[in-house]
């Protein structure tokens, strides 16, 4: 597999023995809060389904969240996260960040990377469609958004004209992160084509990394879409004037001149599409660690350095089925 996000669906699940750590503490994360809501909903569903189940002499098996591993708790907590408040989204992503990087505390990771508690994501770092969020400046109106293209048109960006006329080389205005190359291709064909923009395709299935580095060096793209491993490699790989690879991706190391820079990026869209086994880019073993590495090495430095916010969006196109 090599972490290139292009393996078959079956290969994604051959090894799901995820990091065995202590259960995340409820005071640090959104998991317990979200799961309590799910328990309440499931209890109501069980009551409503009791009559139907009795006809088939079957009883629905109630999921015991208390017995789930930390990784599976995140899987369940992440379902529906695109419709949660910015506060819950920020806590969920920070919990994923801590878990997948093997952080034993808020200050150190298993690879020795130092992460300050102040780096924890905050609600202003998230743009949400939830009308009950309470953060008016982070809300999209109207609430009902069908496609990502429509989402971008309706106010998620500071300016749609700037997106179309984007001139900054190597740093897209909007970056979309998907769980696979196939998913990226599907979004390009079925959704993003309506924007009529050139899009930087940053996933392994499309072209070699050297070609992508050359492309990012020579042209500007308002919109880019990619998979976690390729995005992480591009953001932690140096380039020279010819667009050739001059350094390799290393944990915790960010070159002074990366092929992919987020210095001017305004919006990072995390596609919440679930595959047929209900995993997302934040919870799939093959993509989650690389996504958090990318956030650590490319996004957090920008959050620290910039006065203007770089924002995350958890987005789910309800019409898309893989």
Image: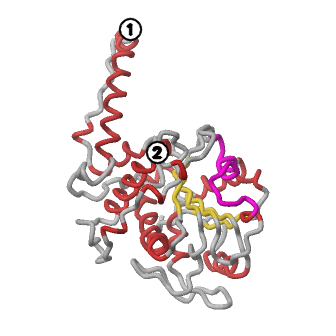
**Residue 322 drawn above or below residue 171:** above
What residue sits 34% from the left and 66% below the top? 101
Q: Which residues are magenta?
A: 145-161
Q: Position of residue 65 (x, y in %)?
A: 27, 38
| Quadrant of res 54 | top left
Main secondary structure found in the magenta portion: helix
Q: Position of residue 120 (x, y in %)?
A: 36, 63
Residue at the extreme left: 22
Q: Identify the residue position indicated by label 2 in the image.
A: 134
Label 2 – label 1 distance at C-alpha:
44 Å
In the image, 94: left or right of 311?
A: left
Q: Position of residue 107 (x, y in %)?
A: 27, 71
Q: Earlier in the sequence, mark 2 or mark 1?
A: 1
Q: Identify the residue position indicated by label 1 in the image.
A: 55
**Residue 141 drawn above or below residue 236:** above
Mark 2 or mark 1, whichever is nearer to me? 2
**Residue 120 drawn above or below residue 260:** above
What residue sits 47% from the left and 70% below the top? 303
Count of numbered labels shown in the rendering:
2
In the image, residue 158 lies in the stretch drawn in magenta: yes
Q: Secondary structure at mark 2?
A: loop
What residue sits 32% from the left and 46% below the top? 31
Tell me the quarter of the image containing the C terminus: top right
């Amino acid at each position: 597999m090599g972490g290139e996000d292009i393996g078959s669906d079956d290969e994604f699940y051959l090894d799901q023995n995820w990091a065995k750590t202590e259960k995340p503490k409820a005071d640090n994360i959104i998991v317990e809060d979200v799961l309590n809501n799910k328990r309440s909903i499931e209890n109501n569903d069980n009551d409503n389904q009791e009559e139907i189940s009795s006809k088939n002499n079957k009883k629905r098996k109630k999921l015991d969240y208390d017995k789930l591993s930390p990784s599976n708790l995140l899987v369940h907590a992440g379902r529906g996260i695109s419709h949660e408040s910015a506060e819950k989204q920020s806590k969920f992503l920070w919990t994923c960040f801590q878990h997948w990087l093997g952080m034993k505390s808020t200050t150190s990771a298993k690879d020795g990377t130092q992460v300050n508690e102040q780096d924890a994501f905050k609600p202003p770092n998230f743009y949400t469609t939830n009308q009950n969020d309470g953060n008016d400046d982070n809300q999209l109106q109207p609430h009902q958004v069908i496609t990502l293209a429509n989402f971008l048109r309706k106010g998620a960006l500071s300016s749609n004209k700037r997106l179309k006329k984007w001139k900054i080389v190597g740093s897209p205005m909007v970056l979309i992160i998907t769980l696979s190359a196939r998913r990226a291709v599907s979004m390009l064909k079925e959704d993003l084509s309506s924007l009529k923009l050139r899009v930087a395709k940053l996933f392994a299935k499309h072209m070699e990394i050297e070609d992508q580095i050359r492309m990012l060096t020579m042209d500007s793209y308002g919109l880019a879409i990619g998979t976690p491993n390729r995005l992480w490699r591009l953001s932690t790989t140096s380039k020279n004037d010819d667009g050739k690879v001059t350094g390799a991706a290393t944990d915790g190391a960010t070159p002074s001149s990366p092929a992919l820079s987020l210095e001017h990026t305004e919006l990072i869209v995390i596609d919440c599409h679930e595959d047929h086994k209900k995993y997302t880019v934040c919870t799939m073993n093959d993509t989650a660690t690389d996504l958090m590495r990318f956030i650590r090495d490319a996004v957090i430095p920008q959050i620290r350095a910039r006065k203007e916010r770089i924002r995350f969006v958890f987005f789910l196109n309800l019409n898309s089925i893989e």
